[in-house]
Amino acid sequence: MNTKQHNKKKIGTVRITNPLPKIERKIGTVRITNPLPKIERRDELKDNYMKWLKTERLMRPNERRLEYEQMQEKYLESIKLTHDIKKDVKLAKAIKSHYPRGIVGVDSIYNENTVLYKDQHEEIKKKYEIKEKRLKEKGEVLEKHNQKNGNFLTFQENN
């Protein structure tokens, strides 16, 4: 009886596998969202709430109740947005502090569409452009020098 139960356990085991194929690129599988639109929406909701508090006008009870319910919904939305913003900022800070050059599959300095490392990506891009410019200038100087003195590489038999 023990062997049958033991066999059932073997048959009933489930293997958890990675849903992504091995060949598929992992860049962009996890998204880090930019919290700025959420912050703008939250600030807009707060401004509307402050305007609502300052309004002093006569209303019927049912109008006041409807307006109060609408403001309550907006208040709950602003609380949810605040929570989401805090979560996004906390994630971004953790990633930037623990992984200063980025994480494969999430975000990195070398990704053009980066959210967290945008400044560093621009810095690397500028350095690369300066390097390319210097190489081009150096090539032009060498070409000019070769035109004056003759290109000695063309006269060699091996090259």
Image (tube, rainbow, N blue to C red):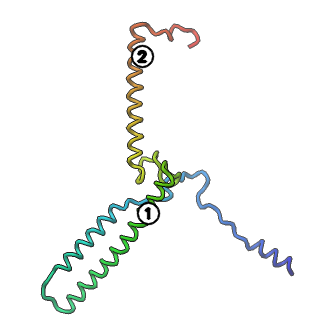
Is 116 in front, or is 149?
A: 116
Which three-letter amino acid code belongs to the residue tagged 2? Leu
Q: Looking at this rendering, what residue extends furthest in the left direction?
A: 57
Indicate the quadrant containing the N terminus: top left, top right, bottom left or bottom right: bottom right
Callout in the foreground (1, 2): 1
Name the element at disc 1: helix
Q: Residues within 10 Å of mark 1 (few under 14, many from 20)?
A: few
Q: Mark 1 points at which residue?
A: 90
**Residue 82 in the image: x percent, y percent?**
36, 70
Q: What residue type is labelled 1?
A: Lys
Quarter occupied by the C terminus: top right
Q: Which of 149 and 39 is in front in this view?
A: 39
Q: Which label was assigned to residue 142?
A: 2
Q: Is residue 85 above or below residue 20?
A: below
Residue 126 image label? none
The residue lying at 47 percent from left, 59 percent from top is 94
Residue 134 image position (x, y, % from top left): 39, 26
Is residue 53 found left or right of 141 in the rendered image?
Answer: left
Res 65 quadrant in image = bottom left
Residue plotted at (42% across, 47% down): 112
Q: Is residue 67 left or right of residue 142?
A: left
Q: What element carries label 2?
A: helix
Q: Which of 145 and 22 is in front in this view?
A: 145
Q: Determine which quarter of the picture holds residue 146.
A: top left
Sequence-first tag of 1 and 2: 1
- Label 1 to label 2: alpha-carbon separation: 52 Å
Left or right: residue 153 compared with residue 43: right
Residue 49 % position (x, y): 24, 76
Residue that sits furthest to the front in the current view? 97
Residue at image point 86% right, 76% down: 3
